[in-house]
Image (spheres, rainbow, N blue to C red):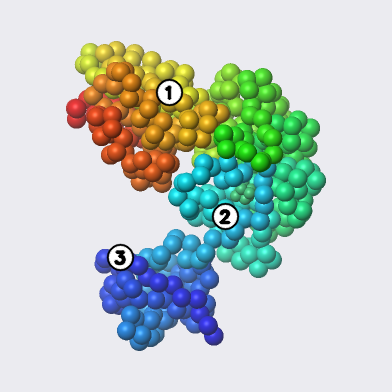
Amino acid sequence: MKYKEHKIVEVEPGSIAEELEIEAGDTLLWINEENIQDVFDYRYLMADEAIDICIRKQNGEEWVIEIDKEYGEDLGLVFETSLMDDLIRCRNKCKFCFIDQLPPNMRETVYFKDDDWRMSFLNGNYITLTNMSQADINRLIKYRLSPLNVSIHATDPEVRKALLSNRHAGKILEQLKVLVDAGIEINGQIVLCKGLNDGDVLDQTVRDLSQFIPHILSLTVVPVGISKFREGLAELEGFDEESARVVVEVVEKWQKFYLERMGTRFIFAADEFYITGKKPLLTYDEYENFPVLDNGVGMLTKFKWELEKELEKIESSEESFELSLVTGCITKGYMEECVALVNKKLPNYKIHVYPVVNHFFGENITVTGLLTGQDIISTLKQDIPLGKVLCFAENMLKSGEPVLLDDYTVEQISKELDIPIEVLPNEGNEWVQKIIELKEKY
Ligand code: SF4
């Protein structure tokens, strides 16, 4: 049998693998003579207390090693990618796809469109189910991988096919039923596009999905992102104050309905709808433990709640300090409210909030997480007070690296603006602590 080969790039110090003299550069060929397709096979096969593995050393020797270990104990092998396989390509051409709207000349990898169910578990990605084979579904069920994040968008078959530009996209209700019947839980997402899947279509989608509650844990409605690079693409319109307010009201209607019948609000609108529609965000308790925080739902309420709790704990102080924050245009007012709360306890902290217009993707993109180095530099390079330190939000950086979306490093921006830069955490309590620590540092 031909086994899929997995190159080992690192062996964790003190691990079982190190003890067995497995080295970076060696190759894993099989576990218990079973082929390893990806990390899910690997984890499953590796979990047992007694396993045999086959390693090909760099000199070509093949070692078969018997291992006795604790159940679930890791071997300490690190592979080239966390998936241990190539990503599955997307087969859709969604009208709202943000990858189609990226500027030219970004790094090649950002243009790759994946729609890989495994990344839902590894990375929290939402997947459309349009390219899952029966074998994929069998594996997902076999490994009891749950919850799965699904981009539903619309349950009406024709609307979904048109939205995804995929004639195979119309069977979402049947597909969800198979998964739910097999015990898989789902988080659903709707990318809302004005005139395409809002209004009656949205109502029907929510109504259709109710049959799967409580196996569908939540349904998130997020607004379509529209960059300035839409030449040759379908015409789409963003949400203004009036249309965003309508979306919040529709979501609130359904929340009331489900809360009375099922004890959960079930459907949540992204924070952007509330801010754009000038509607008050839900309270901390109303977000029901924040089931879909990663999808931009409830982040602002959670942050402010944590910030207020932390401020209650600290002593008032007359100490003075000056610093600056950059923010997306949409959260300017919200950040100013947070600063006003800080100033009740620390009245001599001068905290400048600078909204940065997004010229890189276009002015319609107003969230903080999509800001780029070049826009920050051009905004702040004018003669404006910055204080002792400039602060970025954690979600402006690419997966924790000190690099922004346009590949500007934090260090480069700091040099250009001639000011130290600090990254503030996403949790409100840690944010307050960091602001106080910065006073000591600078
Ligand atoms: S599923 Fe749609 S939005 Fe996602 S990458 Fe494919 S085309 Fe783009």
* Disc number for residue 54: none
The residue lying at 24 percent from left, 29 percent from top is 418
**Which mark sits nearer the N-terminus, 2 or 3?**
3
Quarter of the view holding residue 422: top left
Q: Is residue 363 above or below residue 97?
A: above
Of residue 108 and residue 199, the one placed in the foreground of this image is 108
x and y, in percent, of residue 111 in the image: 53, 50
User: What amino acid is found at the position of numbered circle 2 in the picture?
Assistant: Asp
Q: Is residue 251 visible?
A: no
Quarter of the picture holding the N terminus:
bottom right
Give the crowd class for mark 3: few <14, some 14-19, many >=20 residues within 10 Å.
Answer: some
Of mark 2 and mark 1, the one earlier in the sequence is 2
Identified at 58% across, 22% down, the residue is 276
Which residue is labeled 2 in the image? 114
Q: Give residue 256's quadrant in the image.
A: top right
- What residue is disc 3 on? 12
Q: Identify the residue at image location x=28%, y=32%.
A: 416
Disc on the earlier residue, 3 or 1:
3
Residue for badge 1: 355
Asked whether the beta carbons under mark 3 and mark 1 sit within 8 Å of each other, the answer is no
Q: CA distance from mark 2 to mark 1?
A: 32 Å
State the SS at label 2: loop
Tell me the CA gap for discs 3 and 1.
43 Å
Is the CB of mark 2 within 8 Å of ligand 1?
A: yes
